Amino acid sequence: MGLPSLTLGGLVELNASNLPPSQLFEVLSKYEAEAVLLAAGSGSPEPSGTHSELLSLFYSSFFFSHLLTQQKSSRSEARALTHRLPQILQQQDPSIKSCIALLRALWQTDHVQVFQLLRTASWPEGLHPLVQRYERKISLQSLRHHTSVTELTRWIGFFQDQSLIAVSRSYEAIRPEVAASYLGLDQAAAAQNDPSIIQKFTECGWRWDLESRLLHPAPINVPSSADKGSTNVFRDTMAMLGNQGH
Amino acid sequence: MDTLPPADAFAPAAEDSYLANNSSGRPGTASVGADGSLKLKVDEPQIHSEAESLYSSFSSPGRTRFNRLYLIGTTSTVLSVDALKAAIVEAKNGKDIKNYERAVRALAEVAPKEPEASLDTVWAQNLQRNISAQTERLEHELRGYKNNLIKESIRMGNEDLGNHYYETGDMVAASKAYSRMRDVCTTPNHITSMIFKMINVFIERNDWLGVASYAGRLRTTQAKPEEMARNQPKMASALGLSQMHSNQFFEAAKTFLSVDPSLADTYNEVLTPNDVAVYGGLCALASMNRSELQRLVLDNSTFRNFLELEPHIRRAIAFFCNSKFRPCLEILEAYRADYLLDLHLQRHVATLYGRIRTKAIQQFLLPFSSVTLDSMAAIFAPEVVGGQARPTGTMSPFVHELIGLIKDDVLDARIDLEKGLLVSNQSDLRNEVQAEALESVRSFNDELHLRTLRASVLHAGLQLSPPDPERKTGRGRIAASAGKGPRGQGLAGY
Amino acid sequence: MASLNEIVVASTEFGNVVHPSAEAYDRQIRQHLSFLRRALSNQDLNSVLNDESVFDKLDPSKDSITYLLILRHQIKAAQEKAGKSTPAKLLPIGGLWRRMAYYLENFEPVQTRYVGQEWRQVVEVFAQTAEEFSQPILATQVIRDAILRLDPSSAVFTSTHLLFARLCLRAKTYSCALPVLKRPICHIPAALNGSNLRSAPLLCDDHQSSLAFLGEKSGFSSKLSHKEFLEYFLYGGMIFMAVKDWRNASHFLATVVSMPSVGVISKIMLEAYKKWILVGLLETGKLNTLPSITPSHASKTYHTLAKQYVQLAEAYERGDSRKFQERFDSGEERWKQDNNTGLVLQVSESLTAHFLKRIKKTFASLTISQLLEQDTPLPKDPAAAESIIASLITAGDLKATLVHSSNHSGDTMLRFSAGSNSSRLSHELDVQAQLKKEKLMLEVLMNRIDESKHNLALSDELVDHLRKGQSWTGAGENGADKDDGADIEEDIMVDFA
């Protein structure tokens, strides 16, 4: 049926492959049925230990691929996933438990907790590429190179970048320690106006006001996928209504 | 026989309504007494008329004069004793024992030691006997006229009887007697006279729909044009009054504006030319924009005759037209106490003043895209500016008022507390049009889809109907769905 | 007397045939079909046909008919042998399971139009087996793709749609359902006499409307009643609720609520009405008005029987957080009984955003502590209030900006400004993208209505049916389902509170 069967090695390779999030999601979702069958323990009498490691990595990877796609409903979907995966994993697997904790922190927009989980939870080795992609450690510097918006759109989907964009649009002036909490930077150092932290922000075009000791973010706007050739949609649609409507 | 009538029957319906909107006014000028009746505490210099002058301005004695005096006597603390004494004199000259008793009781409350404060029971008993005798005599005479079948006599007999009941305060009997005149009226003049009698009764009963309907009948009496013209001022005054009491201020203004100056003193039993000027002017201020006020009020040559009697109303309107809102509101404020003592105006002062104030704020904002709250407060809440630590803070009454006006969609503006501004909403037309377009296409699509599905459902015969109609004999749909659970009424099963 | 070999040869021949015209193809398919039916009724072949290896010799993408008929045959045999509808042979990993999946993933849609009933039976067995195995998720994607393969427009309602929606709810695979749910259903196969169709269309022809081959006689749907129709749209609404697509959820529920009816309403409609009110609050912040086509007796019944919901919505709409809390608390039993607690909780959580959107109409800017002087659902602690507001803004639920004061202990300013030019541009592009989507939808609907016009032009039958509808008695009354989706609901809606 065209799909190589689900193996640990295959998964590790897939996670490291840097596939675009939507493709990664597609591929992984095709394996869900197989994972279900493995979990149900039908057929081959392999040692269950191999299974649980494979399943843990599969579901963790699938979970992260949800977050990476950044669809509007991806969090609800990720949540649905945590509900339908095997009970034993939900209760006992550390990686899956961290996924669930991470989701809760995201839901509550608890940035500090999100960063802490991403950085310190014990993720399986094979998952690291996805965790790092999602957290995206060195993004601040790279952002200032992405002057064109189209280039920028490729980068969203990463928690830190997302946070940077959100904060830049939400605050006109912000205390450094609050900004640091959004981006998972050292809050104590930021409160002391540590130059290396302030610099991270100024490199993104933010203005540092020495006197008021506030950062003034430069708003980053990311257009939706709408292409610009659609300015006539409005007129066309109205015309259609006029002709056909009553 | 001697028992006093129960609680004041004349007090306006909504007592607290004229206290409600007093935010910019002088706190403490009015308070509600322990018995729930209104007490006004008015400083002497702020009153522009005294009991004596009020008394004399209603030259025709009668029920209206009593009502006005009684109202002043029961609402103003300063004028109370004088007004009530005058009211007692007025009542003793009349034939309404209940009115007399009411006035005495009111006086006994404020000044129990005054000699007039105790009931003159001898007088009252004599009057009662006289009234009974008179009633009997008039009824007897009327029966005689009826036996003789002389129309004119029957009409006059009914009129006499009606007048008698009116004077003694029996409005139900009065209106019955007057309405019996209708069939025996032989000339338009008779009809006109009967109608005005009826209007007086309706006014006395606060039946403003009745007033409006009888005022309307005056137009259809087939009287001669000159006759009609002679009746116009009274008719319009009565109609204006009824419209004002029905809160139709714009209509009332237009009606009062049309009253012919020949009204003069011809209708003093109801209202005076001064009343027309005040009522008409205030209703106009409350309901018209600046250009309407200029065109329909200030430039109106007939109404000018009335306005000359009350020059401050004319000045207030002129200030409003020139966008000088503070002096306009100050004039009105200065007369608030007077108007609260007015028989017809009392219950509308709060509403009228509130509307004038709101309209002033709206007109003031019109030319600006943003105005500082401080400059607005200086005009619309000078006492607050002087007397409050944060005249334009969120909790200040003025800002509260603005918030209320914005929430009620009266003002299309937003408050910028950071800069202390009131900012007009500049609509982002482009965005708005697009958002509206999106919404309309969406709801069109939704509706279209629902209707398509509906047609398909009907086509496929899937619509719900009561199951098994054959068995549905008399017990209706409940029978059809019985046994489907306790809440099964009207519900078909799954 | 055909042998297995003959069947295989015939199948290969049929698969390779080139059909010059629709008429010729139609004839060939029908011949092939009758040949197979005759062959399969031959008892002698049974043993051979029950051998799974026969499938290795057949290619469903070329000849779907042979594969399907033999598959159906073997399933039936297995069921009869085991004496139950889901014998072990059918269970996942079992051979027949894989054959079913393979068939559903690879069938040829045009040929399949001729074997609708068998196709539906396989889908049903497939779904039933997955459920029996407690893993409905194994069937959702396959069935979704099969539905869309058969009819890419998914415009005709069939019993398979309902089966699919229910399966997705049970499997919690909500986004899997969306491609089907988002294609607007416009037709319901009508129980018309075949003879009344003026010219029976060739099933294999190119058709503008899938109604041509998914009609009542096609067998693709079991007998439909109002129950199936209502359930599908209720379940669909619930799936949209699970992914927080309030707009579509509201539309699906509105379909149920406005169902044509005479004198009665169904429990499903009442249930949908309650959800519809709550979803409306989440979508627009308002107590929406019922669709204009809602029967008036239905509106009245809803209003009386769902009073607590209406009152809750009224308090919400006014932004009266105290009254809302009061009604929220007093209705606790009701929400629980109706399995709406999770949804009501979400409404309650959205009150803050709703309140701030209203405040925005009055103030252009104010500090957090000035905001807290108003009657708000926010916590009284400015720092806590600020963090809630900040998360609403960063999540894009509220258009505003925050400004920290230079005095570090000072008050944070909340500005509801028009926004920068670039943010307005991006907003505009967003609106245009949505407009474009709606325009496409409009085009789709217009086309479907043209089809309906053609279809509904048979006005005599329509009138007939309207009349018959009066005496129609609900089918499926007895088939009360053990699962009405209600138990699933709570699970969907409860957030991390």
Image: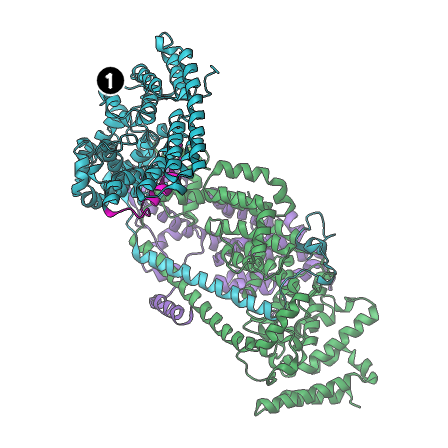
- Location of residue B90 in the rendering, given as x and y in whole percent from the top left corner: 32, 19
User: Residue shown at 78%/73% (left/top)?
Assistant: C76
Can you see residue A196? no
A212 vs C218, nearest the viewer: C218
Residue C136 belongs to the span the image colors magenta: no
* Quadrant, the N terminus of chain A: bottom right
* Quadrant, the C terminus of chain A: bottom left
Image colour assigned to chain B: cyan
Left or right placement of residue A206 versus residue C325 in this view: left
The residue beneath circle 1 is B44
C241 vs B362, nearest the viewer: B362
Q: Relative to residue A139, is residue B97 depicted above or below?
A: above
Q: Magenta segment, which residues?
A: B205-225
Left or right placement of residue C370 versus residue C476 in this view: left
Image colour assigned to chain A: purple
Chain letter for the green colouring in the rendering: C
